Each structure stands twice: as C-alpha cells, then as structure tokens.
Image (cartoon, rainbow, N blue to C red):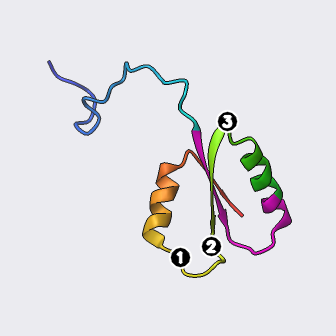
Amino acid sequence: MTSSWPSYARGIGMSCAFEESVMAQRLHLITQPQDSLAQEVVRQHLQAEGESQVRVIDLTAGTVDYAALVDAIFASDSVQVW
C-alpha cells in the first residue's frame, strides 16, 4: 500500500483524541521597559492562569539566552511581543 503522506508525516497519530485537560501555553516577550499596555495584558493573563499557562520573558533585563528563548517560543501556543 502506498501513501500520499510525506515520509516525515507517516505514523503520526491522526486519529488520537484531543485531551480536554491540555492548557494553552502563552508566552509574553517584553522588549520595552515600563510598557503599560503589556503590563496590563500580562496581569490579566496571569489572573486567568487556570485557562492557560503564562510565561513572561523580559528581554530588557540583561543578557538573553537565545537558545532558551527559541525553545520557549516553539513550546508556546501563543507568543505576544511587546
């Protein structure tokens, strides 16, 4: 039997059920110090953290670990850059 799916996609569980308990991963990247809009949105997301997991990385706070930053971006479902 031949497949029209590319070789890298074969074997992916296309019929697996989506788990209801999986929370969205939100990432906020802060690029400007004292951004009042960013602070307010992050505060609201942190208060509603039961709906999603929230992570904030302040890029203005010093040296950036770019490998960890890239990992955090790809591990997130939503990325906001402020």
Assess whether residue 17 is covered by the magenta stretch: no
Q: Which quadrant of the rendered structure holds the C terminus? A: bottom right
Tell me the crowding category of disc 3: few under 14, some 14 to 19, or many 20 or more residues within 10 angstroms, Cα based: some
From what the image shows, is residue 59 above or below residue 73? below
Q: Image check: 62 left or right of 33?
A: left
SS at mark 2? loop
SS at mark 3? loop
Kindly identify which residue carries mark 1. Answer: 64
In percent of width and height, residue 25 lies at 57, 45
Q: Earlier in the sequence, mark 3 or mark 1?
A: 3
Q: Nearer the viewer, mark 3 or mark 2?
A: 3
In percent of width and height, residue 5 lies at 28, 30
Q: Which numbered tag is attached to residue 29?
A: none
Which stretch did the figure color magenta? 24-39
Q: Are marks 3 and 2 in contact (CB under 8 Å)?
A: no
The tally of labels here is 3
Q: Quadrant of residue 81?
A: bottom right
Q: Image check: 58 left or right of 32?
A: left
Q: Which numbered tag is attached to residue 59?
A: 2
Tell me the crowding category of disc 2: few under 14, some 14 to 19, or many 20 or more residues within 10 angstroms, Cα based: some
SS at mark 1? loop
Determine the residue positioned at 25% across, 31% down.
10
Determine the residue positioned at 33% across, 25% down.
13
Determine the residue positioned at 84% across, 60% down.
37
Observer-nearest residue: 2 or 27?
27
Q: Image check: 66 left or right of 58?
A: left
Q: Amino acid at mark 2?
A: Leu
Q: Earlier in the sequence, mark 3 or mark 2?
A: 3
How far apart marks 3 and 1 lie (CA) works out to 28 Å
From what the image shows, is residue 72 above or below residue 64? above
In percent of width and height, residue 39 lies at 80, 61
Kindly identify which residue carries mark 3. Answer: 51
